[in-house]
């Protein structure tokens, strides 16, 4: 009788431990997925500001057709990437749009009236704010992924990855030199290079 009770207790403990492991992995995975959604929100918000920026700049530099086409293509790339779960595609679209925005700002350098335009300045302010939020969202996602990846690769949680349907996720790594949007200094007419790349998940 005692042996049966002991066996039952062991089985219950193992079942409870399995439930804890399953829930831990699922919660970590859901947290990473939600964090990725936060990146999509900021990427989409920034892309939505682009048409107004383009129209404002066009009013002063309509002949810069190539620059506007590049921005439009990059915006479309962001919209497409935001609909999927491919982290690398999101990072590439992010970098492409950043580069296109830098070229728009470079065009603006040639038009003093444009740089003083209230609408242009407000859009620049909104874009800068969105970039700050995007930077935070990237770091938040990478932190969530670091937590998840540690769990799925360490004992005892790694034994529950198959049951939980949870696996390692990719970090959000923009191409080197594209982790932050270079800022055009309208006061001096120079472009400040982006800071060195920081390791993912740091």
Image (spheres, rainbow, N blue to C red):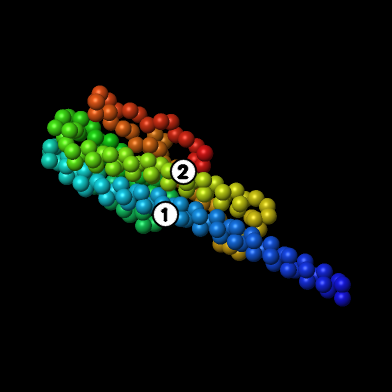
The dot on residue 139 is 2
Q: Helix, strand, or loop for circle 1?
A: helix
Is residue 155 placed above or below 117 in the rendered structure?
below
Q: Earlier in the sequence, mark 1 or mark 2?
A: 1
Residue at 47%, 55% in the rendered image: 33
Is residue 63 placed above or below 49 in the rendered structure?
above
Residue 172 picture location, percent across and down: 45, 45
- The answer to whether one can see residue 159 in this image is yes
- Rate crowding at label 1 as few (under 14), some (14 to 19) or many (20 or more) other CA atoms within 10 Å: some
The dot on residue 59 is none
* Quarter of the rendering occupied by the N terminus: bottom right
Residue at 41%, 42% in the rendered image: 135
Is residue 101 placed above or below 158 in the rendered structure?
above
The reply, left or right, for residue 32 in relation to residue 64 is right
Q: Nearer the viewer, residue 125 or 147?
A: 125
What residue is pinned by disc 1?
Answer: 37
Residue at 14%, 37% in the rendered image: 61
């Amino acid at each position: 009788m005692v042996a049966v009770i002991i066996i039952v207790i062991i089985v219950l403990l193992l079942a409870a431990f399995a439930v804890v492991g399953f829930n831990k992995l699922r919660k970590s995975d859901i947290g990473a997925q939600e964090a990725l959604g936060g990146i999509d929100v900021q990427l989409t918000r920034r892309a939505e500001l682009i048409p107004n920026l383009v129209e404002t700049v066009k009013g002063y530099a309509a002949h810069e057709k190539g620059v506007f086409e590049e921005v439009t293509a990059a915006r479309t790339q962001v919209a497409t990437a935001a609909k999927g779960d491919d982290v690398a595609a999101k990072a590439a679209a992010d970098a492409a749009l950043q580069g296109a925005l830098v070229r728009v700002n470079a065009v603006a350098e040639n038009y003093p009236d444009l740089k003083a335009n209230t609408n242009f300045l407000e859009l620049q302010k909104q874009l800068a704010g969105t970039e700050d939020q995007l930077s935070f969202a990237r770091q938040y996602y990478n932190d969530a992924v670091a937590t998840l990846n540690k769990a799925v690769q360490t004992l005892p949680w790694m034994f529950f990855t198959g049951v939980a349907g949870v696996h390692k996720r990719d970090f959000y790594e923009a191409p080197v030199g594209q982790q932050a949007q270079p800022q055009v200094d309208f006061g001096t007419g120079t472009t400040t290079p982006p800071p060195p790349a920081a390791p993912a998940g740091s």
